[in-house]
Image (spheres, rainbow, N blue to C red):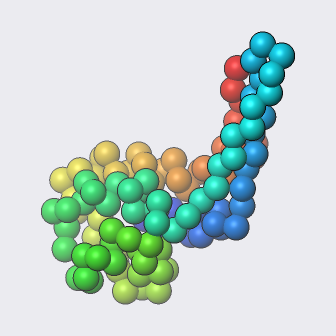
Amino acid sequence: MLRKAAEAWEKLLNLRYDMVFGRKKKSYVVSLSFERYDFPHLVGMQYANDVDFKINPAEYYGEKLITAILSGRLDPKRIEKSKNWDRIQKRLQVLVNLQDTLENGFSFF
């Protein structure tokens, strides 16, 4: 699932979502963009500190994480060995489905 999340995030890097909200006859624009350095925190790498990924720890706490996963240097299955896997798995599922949610199933009232 970590690899799927990395692939999904990689697709989002070149996108920006502008959402317009209105309240009391005024509109507000919120822009949502995606950066490589946000990925480690969003997938919950801070909860996987009990896992040895067999790479330099600096690579899985920075913007190099996606590259390490997609190139195969980091085995994404290792994250499932974390004692916090249940917590991490929920985050991964959200990221895998994020683009579809934003484009097809997102309503805010």
**Which residue is the extreme one toward the right?**
25
Q: How many marks?
A: 0
The picture places residue 16, in percent across and down from the top left corner, at 72, 56
Q: Position of residue 38 (x, y in %)?
A: 47, 60
* Residue 101 image offset from top left, x and y in percent: 66, 44
Q: Which residue is drawn at the image coordinates 46% and 66% (left, top)?
A: 37
Q: Residue furthest front?
A: 26
In front here: 53 or 18? 18
Identity of the residue drawn at 65% across and 49% down: 32
- Seen from the viewer's position, the closer of residues 89 and 34 is 34
Locate the N terminus and report the quarter of the image it occupies: bottom left
Q: Determine whether 39 is above or below 106 in the image.
A: below
**Quarter of the C terminus within the rendering:** top right
The reply to whether residue 1 is visible in this rendering is: no
Residue positioned 39% across, 62% down in the render: 40
Horizontal arrangement in the rendering, residue 5 relative to residue 51 (left or right):
right
Seen from this angle, which residue lies furthest top? 24
Q: Is residue 80 left or right of residue 22?
A: left
In the rendered view, would you say 70 is above or below 12? below
**Left/right of residue 70 with respect to residue 49 in the rendered view:** right
Find residue 25 and report its horizontal and vertical position in percent.
83, 16
Image quadrant assignment for residue 20: top right
The correct choice, above or below, for 19 with respect to 5 in the image is above
